[in-house]
């Protein structure tokens, strides 16, 4: 079953981040549930912080699931899985251990997007990906013991220079032989993929999570993508998971979330809610 969700940060999100709701979980979680959403993607800075545990209690109280736990805050601190500095890679492994265990408690997966890091001058992309793979192998014991899937998120070339398209990311997973999955984001797909529809079909066996956004990183219907036809493709490939609005809070978080709820209600995914 496809379930609509939104992005929620447990800390003050940096300006320009595609995080619909930020902090103030006592207000935001009831609002999200009241709009008919069935889950969230959680941006977590410190899984041991009081707010992290309080969020789990509130999400349970309002019957909201967790699709993905997003460790983007690590990238903001300059911590990357493919970094050339082994000390940095060891610190990322240490920090991800706690995030993975938190994701297990939340019942979610962990996304590896910006945290994988950039290819740097003087080395090949393959060398960067080899370090990324090596670091993944070191965190697999905890992710597998906790039952937490790890997902690669293709991100457009303006934000990172590794694994930009859906198909190259899917090919990387197949060629690496690592037990990884894909989280695809229609905003990034619109920039990097020849066809959003064909990419979803190509990646269907590895697809576990979707960020469902219009061309301008806002809710469906606020940009120029044919979101209805993309939804139809997801039905066709029998996708069963969250469609998350990892959207910019424009004109404000509640207004964007309401527009998304209207789309999902028209698609039959939100019923009998006041939007």
Image (cartoon, rainbow, N blue to C red):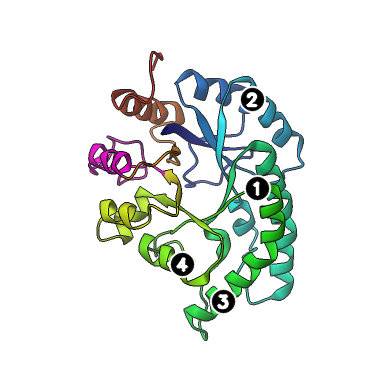
Residue carrying label 3: 130
Task: Please state if 211 lies on the left or on the right of 75 as rendered.
Answer: left
Give the foreground label among 3 and 1.
Answer: 1
Say which mark, if any, is on residue 60: 2
Determine whether the residue tagged by mark 4 lies in a helix, strand or loop: helix
Q: Earlier in the sequence, mark 3 or mark 1?
A: 3
Q: Earlier in the sequence, mark 1 or mark 2?
A: 2
Q: Earlier in the sequence, mark 4 or mark 1?
A: 1
At 76% across and 39% down in the image, what residue appears? 49
Instruction: Determine which quarter of the picture holds residue 233.
Output: top left
Pointers 4 and 1 in contact (C-beta within 8 Å): no
Magenta highlight range = 211-236
Q: Measuring from the top left, give residue 195's x and y in whole percent.
A: 25, 56
Which sits in the foreground, 132 or 73? 132
The C terminus sits in image quarter: top left
CA gap between label 3 and label 1 equals 24 Å
Instruction: Determine which quarter of the picture holds residue 219.
Output: top left
Determine whether the residue tagged by mark 2 lies in a helix, strand or loop: helix
């Amino acid at each position: 079953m496809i379930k609509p969700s939104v992005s929620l940060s447990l800390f003050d999100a940096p300006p320009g981040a595609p995080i619909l709701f930020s902090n103030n979980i006592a207000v935001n979680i009831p609002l999200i549930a009241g709009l008919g959403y069935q889950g969230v993607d959680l941006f977590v800075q410190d899984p041991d912080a009081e707010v992290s545990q309080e969020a789990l209690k509130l999400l349970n109280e309002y019957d909201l699931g967790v699709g993905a736990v997003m460790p983007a805050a690590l990238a903001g601190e300059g911590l990357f899985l493919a970094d050339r500095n082994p000390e940095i890679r060891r610190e990322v492994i240490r920090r991800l251990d706690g995030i993975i265990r938190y994701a297990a408690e939340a019942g979610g997966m962990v996304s590896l997007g910006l945290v994988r890091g950039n290819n740097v001058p003087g080395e090949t992309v393959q060398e960067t990906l080899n370090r990324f793979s090596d670091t993944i192998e070191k965190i697999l014991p905890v992710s597998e013991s906790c039952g937490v899937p790890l997902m690669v998120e293709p991100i457009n070339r303006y934000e990172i220079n590794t694994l930009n398209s859906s198909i190259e990311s899917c090919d990387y997973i197949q060629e690496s032989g690592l037990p990884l999955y894909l989280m695809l984001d229609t905003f990034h797909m619109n920039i990097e993929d020849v066809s959003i529809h064909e990419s979803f079909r190509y990646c269907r066996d590895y697809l576990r999570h979707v960020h469902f956004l219009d061309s301008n990183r806002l809710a469906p219907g606020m940009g120029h993508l044919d979101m209805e036809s993309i939804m139809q493709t997801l039905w066709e490939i029998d996708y069963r998971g969250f469609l998350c609005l990892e959207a910019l809070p424009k004109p404000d978080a509640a207004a964007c979330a309401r527009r998304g709820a209207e789309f999902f209600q028209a698609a039959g995914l939100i019923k009998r809610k006041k939007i």
